[in-house]
Amino acid sequence: MILNEKQLPLRAWRGLAASVAALLVWDVLVTVLYLNATTHFEAIDIQFTLFGTVIALFVGFMVNAAYGRWWEARTLWGQVVNSSRSLARQALVLLDEDVPGARPGLAAQVVRNQVAYVHVLRTALRGQPLPEEAGTFLGPDRLAHVERATNRQTAVLLDTDRLLSEAHRRGMVGELSRLELEAALVALTDAQGGLERIKNTPLPVQYRFLPRFFSRLFCVILPFAVVEDLGWLTPLGSGLVGLMFLLAVQIGDQLANPFADGVYDVPMTTISRTVEIDLTQMLGDEPPRPVEPVAEVLY
Amino acid sequence: MILNEKQLPLRAWRGLAASVAALLVWDVLVTVLYLNATTHFEAIDIQFTLFGTVIALFVGFMVNAAYGRWWEARTLWGQVVNSSRSLARQALVLLDEDVPGARPGLAAQVVRNQVAYVHVLRTALRGQPLPEEAGTFLGPDRLAHVERATNRQTAVLLDTDRLLSEAHRRGMVGELSRLELEAALVALTDAQGGLERIKNTPLPVQYRFLPRFFSRLFCVILPFAVVEDLGWLTPLGSGLVGLMFLLAVQIGDQLANPFADGVYDVPMTTISRTVEIDLTQMLGDEPPRPVEPVAEVLY
Amino acid sequence: MILNEKQLPLRAWRGLAASVAALLVWDVLVTVLYLNATTHFEAIDIQFTLFGTVIALFVGFMVNAAYGRWWEARTLWGQVVNSSRSLARQALVLLDEDVPGARPGLAAQVVRNQVAYVHVLRTALRGQPLPEEAGTFLGPDRLAHVERATNRQTAVLLDTDRLLSEAHRRGMVGELSRLELEAALVALTDAQGGLERIKNTPLPVQYRFLPRFFSRLFCVILPFAVVEDLGWLTPLGSGLVGLMFLLAVQIGDQLANPFADGVYDVPMTTISRTVEIDLTQMLGDEPPRPVEPVAEVLY
Amino acid sequence: MILNEKQLPLRAWRGLAASVAALLVWDVLVTVLYLNATTHFEAIDIQFTLFGTVIALFVGFMVNAAYGRWWEARTLWGQVVNSSRSLARQALVLLDEDVPGARPGLAAQVVRNQVAYVHVLRTALRGQPLPEEAGTFLGPDRLAHVERATNRQTAVLLDTDRLLSEAHRRGMVGELSRLELEAALVALTDAQGGLERIKNTPLPVQYRFLPRFFSRLFCVILPFAVVEDLGWLTPLGSGLVGLMFLLAVQIGDQLANPFADGVYDVPMTTISRTVEIDLTQMLGDEPPRPVEPVAEVLY
Amino acid sequence: MILNEKQLPLRAWRGLAASVAALLVWDVLVTVLYLNATTHFEAIDIQFTLFGTVIALFVGFMVNAAYGRWWEARTLWGQVVNSSRSLARQALVLLDEDVPGARPGLAAQVVRNQVAYVHVLRTALRGQPLPEEAGTFLGPDRLAHVERATNRQTAVLLDTDRLLSEAHRRGMVGELSRLELEAALVALTDAQGGLERIKNTPLPVQYRFLPRFFSRLFCVILPFAVVEDLGWLTPLGSGLVGLMFLLAVQIGDQLANPFADGVYDVPMTTISRTVEIDLTQMLGDEPPRPVEPVAEVLY
C-alpha cells in the first residue's frame, strides 16, 4: 500500500513504460507518415467519441469492480484484526486459571496461537512458505502439526479450538463463555473464507480482457482520427488520451489482485504485525516494532 | 471459471463466431453497395452517437447486474465452505464420544454428511443426477432416504440435524453446544436458499432483451452511418464497434447464469472438492487430490 | 416472472402498443409536413444529443432503483423460504413428543401453521382475500381467529408462538431450544416487515415521473431534430430511439412494483408452493404438484 | 410520501415556480436581445454538451446519494416496526403473569411503552413536542420522567428495560428469555441511532452545492448557446433542458432530508400509527383507525 | 461538518484560491496570445469532449468512493453511539449492586469507562494526545494504565471487560447477562476496527492521482480548444469548466479523509459529547452542554 496520497510513485509509471513508449513511437510514426503522404482521414472523429466513451464506461465498471475486491479484502482483514482482539481479550478475561485442575499458560497459548494464525494466513494468501513467527508463537510441536495440513490456517484454528475444549474439560471456563469464545473462531473462519474466495476467484477474464484489449486498440486507431486536426501535436494529444486509458486499466489490474505482494497490495505484513503488537502487549510481553514503510510503501 | 486472467480463451470467441461473421458480411455488403451506388447518408452520424451511448449505458447496467449475481453466487458458496468448516470443527470438538452411552463415529458421520451435502448441492444447482460422492459419504441407507426427497440437499441437512438430536439424547453434547452446531445448519440453509434463489430467478428478461436487441440493431444500422466517412474501411470500423457491443452483451449473458456448467461458471466442482479435502483431513483420512484445471478452466 | 430468458413475450409489447402507435403517427406526421413545407431545423441536433444523454442517465438511475426493489423483494422471499425450512426442521427435531404431558401433533401443527403463513403473506401482499390453503393448514378454529386480525400474517406468527409457549409449558422443549425456534420467528418478522415496506412505499414519484415525462417529451421533439438528415427514414430512426426510451421506462415501472400480480412479478405463488411441498414432505405427507408456468410465465 | 405513482402533484411544481419563471424571463430576454442585436455565438455549443453531460453526471450522483439516504431511513423505520412487533409478541408470550409474585399488567405495559416509543421517536426526528399518544400510553408518572430527559426516546427504552428487570426479579421470566427480549431493545437502539445519524448528518454541502450552483449557471448560459440555432424557439428548448436540471436537483434536495415533515417525507405518522394498531390489537384493545392520506399524501 | 446545507462557506473556496487564480491567469494569457498572434486551433474541440467526459467519469468514481468512506466512517461512529447506549443501559439494569459482596459504584464505573472510551477513540483517530475527559472519567489509576498502552482505546475496553469479570466474580451478574454485556464490547471492537481501517488505509493513490492530474492537465489545455469559438470570453468559459473539475476533485479529497480535523470532518467531538450527555444523564449526573457550531461548522 502506497502511503503517499498525492503523488503516484515512480515505480508505478515503470510498469507502463513499455506500453507508453510503444504508444508514442506509434503516434509519431502515424503523424510523420500523414504529414508527408497527405492521406485523408478527416470526418471519422465523431465515431471515435462514441468508441472512446463506451470504452471509458467499461473501463470504469472494471475499475469499480476491482476497487470493490480490494476494499472487501481490506475489510475482511479488518475483521481478522477485530476478532483477534476480541478472542484475546476474552481468553484472558474468561479463562480462569485459578480453579483447581487449571493448566497455567493455557489462556496465553490461545493468544499466541492467534498471533501465529494471522501470520500463517498472511503467507498462505501470498503463496509464501510458513513465516518465522509461526515457530515463535506455536512452539515446535504445534508447528510440526500445522505444517502437515493442506490448509494450515484452518489447522491453527482447529488447534485453538482444542485448547478451548481442554479448558472446558478442566473447568476453567463454563459452557456459555466457551461458546462466546467459539463465536470468535466462527467469525475468523468466515473472514478467512472470504479472503480465500477473493484469492482463488479472479475477476472474470472477460471483465479484464475487454477493457484492456479495446483500450489498446483505441490507442492504435486514435492518431489516425486526430492527425488532421492536431498535425504535429498529434503525439501529444493522442498520447495523453491513450495514457489515461492505459493508466486506468493498470489501476484495475492492480486493485483486482490485492494479495500479489506488490506495492498496491493490502498491507498484510503491517496488519499482522499490528495484531502481534496488540496481543503481545495484552500478554504483558515486549511488543515488536511496527512495520516501517519502505520508500513510502507499506507491505 | 477461466484461470487465465489476461487472455480470453479461444472458445469464448467461438460463441460469437456466427454473430461476428454475419456482422462482417453485412458491413461488407453495405460498403460495396454504397461505394457503387453512391447513396447519400452523410448527416446522420450524430444521432448515432446518442443511440450508441444510450445502448452502452444499458449494456453497462445489465453487465453490472449480471456480475452482481455471479459474485453473490460465489460469495454464497464461500459461506457454504465457511459453515462446512465450522460445523466439522465444532462437531469434532464439541461432541463427546467418551461419555457412557455415546455412539462412536457419530461425530465423523456428521462430518461425512456435510461432505455429501456440498456435492449434492452442487449437482442440484446444475440439474445433474446425485453424484458418486453422495453414496461414498452417506452410505447406502442414508442415500436411499435422500434419493426419495424432492429437495435432496434439504434432506441431507435434516438427516444431520437428526444425528445431532441423537447425540443430544445420548448425552454426548449439552443443549447449548447443540444449538451452536444448529447455528451452522441455519447458516447453511440460508446460503442454500440464496443459491436456489439465483438459480430459479433469471435476470429479468427485459434486462437481457433490451441490450441484446438494440445492440444487434445498432450493428445493423452502423455501417450506413459511417460508410461515407470511412469508405472501404467501413467493415473494419463498424465491425470493431459492433464486436465490442456483442462481446459486452455476451459477458452479461454468461455471468447472469453462474450455474450453467460452462466455462464461465462458479467453479462448484473445485469448491466442493476443497471442502472434501479439508473435512476428510480433519477426520484424519487420506484426502482426494484437488480438481485440476482443464485447458485453463476450473469447473 | 417470465421464464424465457431471451425473448420478450408478445404481451410485454402490448402494454406499449398505444404509445408506440402514437409515436409512429407523430413521426410520420412531422416527416410529411416537413418534406412538403420545407421548414428549417438543421442545426439543433447537437443539443438533442445532450438532452437524450441526460434523459438516458436518469432513466438508467430509475431502472437501477426499480431493479434493486425487485431483487430485494425476491431476496426477502428467499429469507421467508429459508426461515420456513429452518423453523420446520427445528420444530420436528427439537420438540419432544415422547415426554409425559406432551401434546401429540403439536410439532406438526407448527409446520402446518408455517405453510399457512407463507400463503397468507402472499395474498396479503397482492391485496387478495385469504387463500384456500389457509383453511386447509390452519383448521377452522385458527382460521376464524386469524380472519379477525388486521394484519393476518402477524396473527399466524403469534399463534405459532403460542404453540411454542404451550410446548415449553408441557416440557416438550427446553428454554434454550425454544429461543432457537423463536429466532426463526424473529427472522420471519423481519422479512415480512421488509416485504410490507416495499409494498407500502412506492418508488418516489419524482423518480418515476421525471424519466417518463421527459422520455415522452423527447419522443415528441425528436422527429423535428432528425427530419432534415433522415428525410423519409425519419419515422424509422426517430421511432427506434423513442421505442428504446419507452421500453426502458416500462421496465422500470414493472420492476418497481414486484407484487402487482402481473407477468413481471416476484413469483410468489410458485415460491409459497415450493415451501408447501418441502414442509409437507418433511411431515411425511403427500406434497402437492409444483406450480406450472402459464405461457412461459410463473406467478 | 406521495401516493400517486404517476403524476407529480401540483404542489411539487410550486416550489419550482420562482426558479422556472426566472428561467423563462431570462431565456426570452436573451432571445429578444439576440434576434434584435444579431450578436454572434454560433460555435460554442459543443463545449456546452460537455458542460451539460458533466453536470448531469454530478446531479445523478447527488440524486443517488439522496435516494440512498431516503431508502435507508425508510428501511430503519421498517426495522423499528419489525422489532416493535417482535418485542410485543415476545412480551405477551414469554412474560408469565401466573407465577406467584407476578405483577398483573406488566406485559401489557411493556407493549404500551413500545407504542409510546414509536410516537416519541417520530416527533423527536421531526423536532416536534411530545405527542399526545405519549401521555395516553405511558401514563402520567412515566410521562413526567420521560419529559425530563434530553433524549426522550432513549428514556422510554430505559424504562422498558426496567420493567423487564422487574419481571425478572419477580420470577415472571427466566434469564434466557429476558435476554431474548433485551435483544429487541438492542435492535431498537441500533435503528434509532441510524435514524438520528441521518437526521443529524446532512448530505455534505459540497455534494449539494456543486450540482445546484452549476445547474443554475448552466441555465443562465444555455440560451446564448442555442439562440442562433433555435431562434424564437429558444425559450422553449432552453427552458425544457433547464427545467429538467432544476427538477432533478429538487428531487435530490427533497429526498436528502427524509424527516422534514414535507410531502416527500418518510411517512412516519402513518408508520407509527400502524405499529399502534398492530400492538393494541395484540393487547385485545380497540385499535385506532389508520392514517388517511391528505390530498394523496401520507405523512 | 458544515451545517449550512445550501451555501458552500467561504473557507471552502479558500483552498481553491491558488489553483483558481493560476487557472484564470493561464486562461487570460492564452486568450491574449491567441487573439494577437492568430494561431489556428479550430478543429480540435471534439476530441476534448471525449477527454472531458472520460475525466468526468473518473472524477465521479473517485468522488463516489470518497463519499462511501465518509459515510461508512459516520455509520461506524453511529454504531459506537448505539453500542455505548446499549452497554450503559444494560450495565445499569443487569449489574445487581444489592447482592452481598457487590462493589457499589461498579456499574457507574462501567458507564464512565465508556464515556472515556469514546473520547479516547476520537483523539486517537485524529492523532491528538489523550483528552481531558479521559482523566475525568477514568480517574488517575486507570488513566496511568491506559497511557502506557500502544492502542489506548483497546486498553479502555480491556479495563471495562475486567470490571465485568469482577462483577461476575462478586456474583453481581449471571454468566448469561455478562455475555450480553460482552456482546456490546465485541460490537465496539468491530466498530473501532472499522474506523482504524479507514484511518490507516488511504484511498488508493491511483484513484486520487488520476483524476487530479488529468483534471489539471485538462484545465491547461482547455483554453487552446475554445479560444477560437469564445474569443474574449475564453477565460470565463474555460474558467467555469475548469472550476467545476477542480471543485469536484477537492470534494473527493476532503471526503476521503474523514478524520482530518478539518471543516468536512465527521463531527467526532460533537458525537462523543452526545454520548457523554446521554450516559451522564443515565447516571443521574449533570450533563455537559452540547458542542456549539463554530461559524456553522461542527467538529
Image (tube, coloured by chain):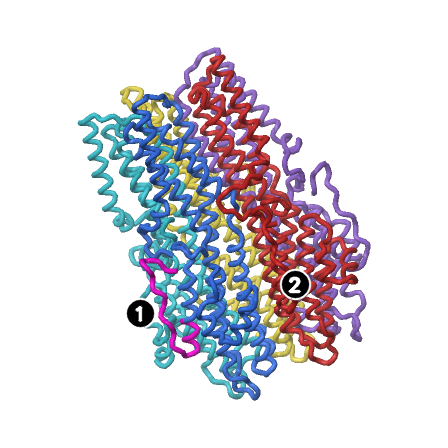
Chain colours: A red, B purple, C yellow, D cyan, E blue
Residue D224 or residue E242, whichever sits in front: E242
If the image is split into quadrants, where does the N terminus of chain E sit?
bottom left
Measured from the top left, where is residue C41 in percent x and y? 30, 24
Q: Are marks 2 and 1 in contact (CB under 8 Å)?
A: no
Residue C134 as seen in the image, left or right of residue B174: left
State the CA–CA distance, disc 2 to disc 1.
48 Å
Element on which disc 1 rests: loop
Measured from the top left, where is residue B75 in percent x and y? 61, 51
| Chain designation of label 1 | D
| Chain designation of label 2 | A
- How many callouts does the rendering have? 2
**Residue type (three-letter) at the residue carrying disc 1:** Pro
Q: Which mark is residue D24?
A: none
As drawn, A171 above or below A188: below
Tell which tag, 2 or 1, sits nearer the viewer.
2
Residue C11 as seen in the image, left or right of residue A270: left
Quarter-of-image position of residue C188: bottom right
As drawn, C238 above or below A35: below
Residue D210 in the magenta stretch? The answer is no
Quarter-of-image position of residue A107: bottom right
**Can see residue E55?**
yes
Magenta region, residue range? E277-299
Residue sitting at x 68%, y 77%? C99
Report which residue position mark 1 lands on.
D129
Q: Which residue ends up furthest to the top in the rendered image?
A: B36
As drawn, B2 above or below A89: above
Quarter-of-image position of residue E157: bottom right
Question: What type of secondary structure mainly makes up the magenta span?
Answer: loop
Residue E54 or residue B230, whichever sits in front: E54
